[in-house]
Amino acid sequence: MKLYQEQELKIYNSLTNQKEVFKPINEGHVGMYVCGPTVYSNVHLGNVRTFMSFDMIFRYLTHLGYKVRYVRNITDAGHLENDADEGEDRIAKKARLEQLEPMEIVQRYTVDFHTILQKFNFKPPSIEPTATGHIIEQIEIVKEIIKKGFAYEVNGSVYFDVLKFNETNDYGKLSKRNVEDLVHNTRTLDGQTDKKNPQDFALWKKAGENHIMRWPSPWSDGFPGWHLECTAMSTKYLGEQFDIHGGGMDLKFPHHECEIAQNEAAKGTSPVNYWMHANMLTLNGKKMAKSTGNNILPGEIFTGNSKHLSKGFAPSVARFFMMQAHYRSILDFSNDALLASEKGFNKLMEAMKTLDELQPSGDKTSFNLAVWKRNCYDALNDDFNTPILIADLFEAVKYINQLKDGKATILTEDLQSLKESMHAFVFEILGLEEQSVTSDDSNTLSGVVDLLINLRNEARANKDFATSDKIRDELAALGVQLKDGKDGTSFSLTK
RNA sequence: GACAAGGUGGCUGAAUGGUAAAGGCAACAGUCUGCAAAACUGUUUUUUACGAGUUCGAAUCUCGUCCUUGUCUCCA
């Protein structure tokens, strides 16, 4: 019996704006597509948060026993800088600026993306397809949409006819907009003469003479439109209809709206059963933007090399911080928040270590393990509510610390069960790692510190507190914190 | 300007009609300690931006005001 058969998972569906019981199309299998990054610069921290939310979701679905095919694309074809005809592929632009081949840019930032995600302990997706690797599939979809009469060609470019589509379908059902409002509120931009209506979006764009990235097509040498790659790749790997499609809130319109339109136009089916949107990350209460300096790179969190940070933080601390908020809430990133999360994270990790060394005690278990476990699963089943889960985990932390002090009891089999559950929630599902509190990662270090601990204890026995305090304080200054307990002295690293 | 989401204690962040609002951090007290730190125990924020309304009852629903964030052009 799979775990998912005894859990009722509810997911907030952006399409219906309500929580719905999750039921995959094929029992036991889940198809999930998440819009990946455009690799024209270092991965944005907000981006990391979004992907982290879906990493946790991927982990939980897998934990429940589902066979998950998780597709997250790499956008390496770039998109238009603006809507004008002379619009330039943003990757091509960066390439010219840095005197590099476009694919060199793609390579550099793809590597950066993977490196950063690895630091944060992400699970790799099942498939990570690239836009440039699926030009043929994209051209095929353009052909289908033209054939169905929902697109038109002008001067070598092909546009999606939004108004025509809206006559038979509902353009705007995801973002809750209606086409009339869009018509009224669309800004007038230069160079839109090719389009019948400003709302129409490009499926294929003819490349200008200087445009480096280009592919042959029935209409022109050019490049695919902004929204097409996700339709092409999700269809190819997950089918015309699949379970979950995720991305950042800002992709809801127009990107995801257009994906729905393309799919409905080409295939006649609405592609996705559960649309999920992760919310934004702000920095010190403000939108992150390079132009205002209100920005921080993920790598800078580890080094502390940023004006917004007082010190560096372990990747797991940042992960813990993000998991303390619900994925659909706006989360504010700040030094104070990180500092507080670090303390909480260390407390949790200490308890995990304590738990591993715990022995059974007493003739009954003085903790309602079944109820606790139920609460943990209920939290995750309620639209992946990780903050509630973490609150529940701290209930267990309290109990673990009481066990350590002999103020609570636990039976052998319950101890085993507690260990398994805590490991599953903390490491497997939340994806946290024991970082920054390692005490025994180096035999040399622990040997040296043990020696100093012994010297200090001798000094204390002789009431030579000047010496003992010197050892303690100077070790602390070096980032080694000594902890006197009932069973002697242990230490942990604070840096 | 239009549309959408939101404004909860010193900080962070849950809870969407019902037993003086979870958890983390901070603060304070006690246990422990040679003194600390760590750990444990307990305490503190009587209140949900502001104003009005609906209700037996609202943080939660409605209206207005102020503010924040997002989308409306590529964007997680």
Image: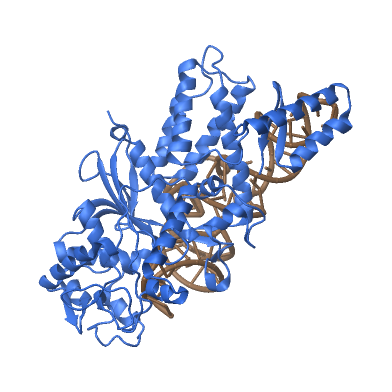
Instruction: Identify the residue at image location x=48%, y=53%.
Output: A116
Pinpoint residue A118: horizontal percent, then vertical percent. Answer: 46, 48
The spot of residue A201 in percent (x, y) is 27, 75
Figure quadrant of the N terminus of chain A: top left
Residue closest to the far left: A147
Whether residue A88 is situated above or below residue A55 in the rendered picture: below
- At x 75%, y 39%, the residue is A476
Q: Compared with residue A347, is residue B76 higher up or lower down, i.e. above or below?
A: below
Q: Nearer the viewer, residue A162 or A476?
A: A476
Q: Is residue A278 shown above or below A93?
A: above
In the visual, does A192 lie left or right of A123? Answer: left
Residue farthest top in this picture: A363
What color is chain A drawn in? Answer: blue
Q: Is residue A304 left or right of residue A287?
A: right
Q: Residue at x 80, y 24 (%)?
A: A457
Image quarter (top left, top right, bottom left or bottom right) of the C terminus of chain A: top right
Note whether residue A145 is visible: yes
Residue A406 vs residue A470, the one in the foreground: A470
**Can residue A38 be seen from the camera position used here?**
no
Q: Is residue A229 left or right of residue B3?
A: left
Q: Note whether A261 is above or below A275 in the view shown.
A: below
Q: Nearer the viewer, residue A109 or B21?
A: A109
> With A65 as the anchor, is A339 left or right in this view?
right
Q: Which of the chains is brown?
A: B
Please provide percent x and percent y for residue B53. Answer: 47, 62
**Picture quadrant where residue A371 is located:** top left
Q: How is the image coloured?
A: by chain
Q: What residue appears at the point 59 percent right and 22 percent down from the top-left corner? A: A403
Q: How many marks?
A: 0
Q: Nearer the viewer, residue A307 or A271?
A: A307
